[in-house]
Amino acid sequence: MALGSFALLYSQLVLPTPSGAGAVELGFLGGAAGDLGQNQGWLLLAWRFYTNGIGVLLGVGLAAHIYGWPALRKLVRRGTGELTEPAGG
């Protein structure tokens, strides 16, 4: 039980959560990872791309493969308010 509690408290210092709070990233950069020098901003950017960007790109690619690009364009138009046909049709 003590090990589980320790892991829940300090595991985010090793690998911050995707789109986590700024405190987690600061703890990561200043705590577990040590001094990364001037490249720490690029490391956080790479982490965000790895945890969020790749998933989004894979999701869009899979949706395009399953539903097709016209359906995705229609969904984006509906989300931006550029719907050209009636909402019921």
Image: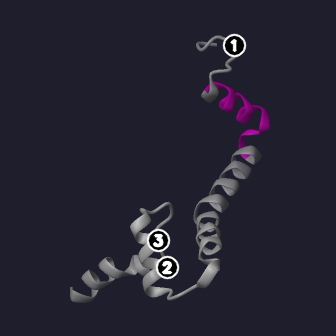
Which residue is farthest front? 38
Which quarter of the figure has residue 50?
bottom right
Disc 2: which residue:
29
Secondary structure category for the residue under label 3: helix
| Separation (CA) of disc 3 from disc 2 | 6 Å
Q: What kind of element bears circle 1?
A: loop
Which residue is pictured at 66% across the width and 52% down the height?
59
- Counting other residues with Cα less than 10 Å from the Cα at mark 3, is it few (<14), some (14-19), or many (20 or more)? many
Q: Amino acid at mark 2?
A: Leu
The answer to whether residue 44 is seen in the rendering is yes
Residue at (67% x, 18% y) in the render: 83
Pointer 1: what residue?
85
Q: Does residue 42 show up magenta in the picture?
A: no
Viewer-proximal residue, 72 or 28?
A: 28
Which quadrant of the rendered structure holds the C terminus? top right
Q: What residue do we see at 44% from left, 73% from top?
A: 26
Of residue 68 and residue 50, the one placed in the foreground of this image is 50
The relative height of residue 32 versus residue 43 in the rendered view (above or below) is below
What residue is pinned by disc 3? 25
Note whether residue 14 is visible.
Answer: no
Vertical placement of 1 versus 71: above or below? below
| Spot occupied by residue 5 in the image (x, y as percentages of width and height) | 25, 81
In the picture shown, does residue 48 fall above or below 82? below
> How would you classify the magenta stretch by its main secondary structure?
helix
| Range shown magenta | 66-78
Residue type at mark 1 is Glu
Quarter of the figure that contains the N terminus = bottom left
Where residue 10 appears, as percent x and y from the top left, is: 35, 81
How far separated are the C-alphas under marks 1 and 2?
50 Å
Q: Residue at x 65, y 59 (%)?
A: 53
Which label sits on residue 35? none
